[in-house]
Image (tube, helix red, strand yellow):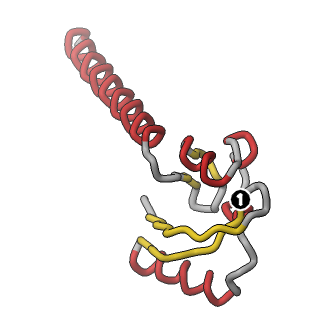
Amino acid sequence: YCSELEKVLAQRDLALQKSEKNLYLANRIIDASLDGIMITRANGEIIQINPAFSALTGYQDYEVLGKNPSILSSGVHGQDYYERMWKELRNKGVWQGEICNKRKSGEVYVEWLTIIEIN
C-alpha cells in the first residue's frame, strides 16, 4: 500500500511541476506580447494585464486590477454597440472589431480589439 501511495504522490508532484512550468511560460508569453492583453473573470473583474496594455492605456496594474474594463470606455459608442458586441461574444465565443477607448490621460484612441471567451 505504501509503495502505491508513493507512486501516486510522485505522479502528482510531476503533474504539479508540469502545470507550474506551463503557467510560468504562459505568463512569460503574455508579458512579452506587443499587443495589450487584459484578462478578466467572467464577471468582468480585471485580474491581469501585460506591459503592452500599460504602455497603450497609461494604466498600471495596481490601477485596474479588480476593476471593470469599462474604465476604458470613451463614451463614443452607444449602448446598442456594446449589446451587439456582447451578444456576438456569447454566441460565437469571440468578438473582433474597431473600438474607441480612452487612455488614463483622457485621450480617446481607436484600436482593433479581440475578445476571446475562455472557459
Determine the image quadrant of residue 4: top left
Question: What is the residue that sits farthest to the bottom in this orientation?
Answer: 80
Q: What residue type is labelled 1?
A: Arg
Instruction: Determine whether 25 is above or below 13 in the image.
Output: below
Please state if 57 lies on the left or on the right of 97 as rendered: right
* Residue at point 64%, 52% (across, down): 46
* Residue at point 70%, 63% (across, down): 72
Pick whichever, 100 or 11, lies toward us.
100
Q: Position of residue 82 (x, y in %)?
A: 62, 81
Instruction: Determine whether 119 is above or below 97 in the image.
Output: above
Q: Position of residue 24 (x, y in %)?
A: 41, 30
Q: Which residue is denoted by mark 1 in the rendering? A: 103
Pick whichever, 17 or 23, lies toward us.
23
Determine the image quadrant of residue 71: bottom right
Helix, strand or loop at label 1? It is loop
Question: What is the residue that sits farthest to the top in this orientation?
Answer: 2
Pick whichever, 28 or 14, lies toward us.
28
Q: Position of residue 75 (x, y in %)?
A: 75, 77
Give the quarter of the figure containing the N terminus.
top left
Please state if 77 lies on the left or on the right of 37 as rendered: right
* Residue at point 43%, 59% (across, down): 118
**Category of crowding for the residue at label 1, using alpha-carbon neighbours closer than 10 angstroms: few (below 14), some (14–19), many (at least 20):** some
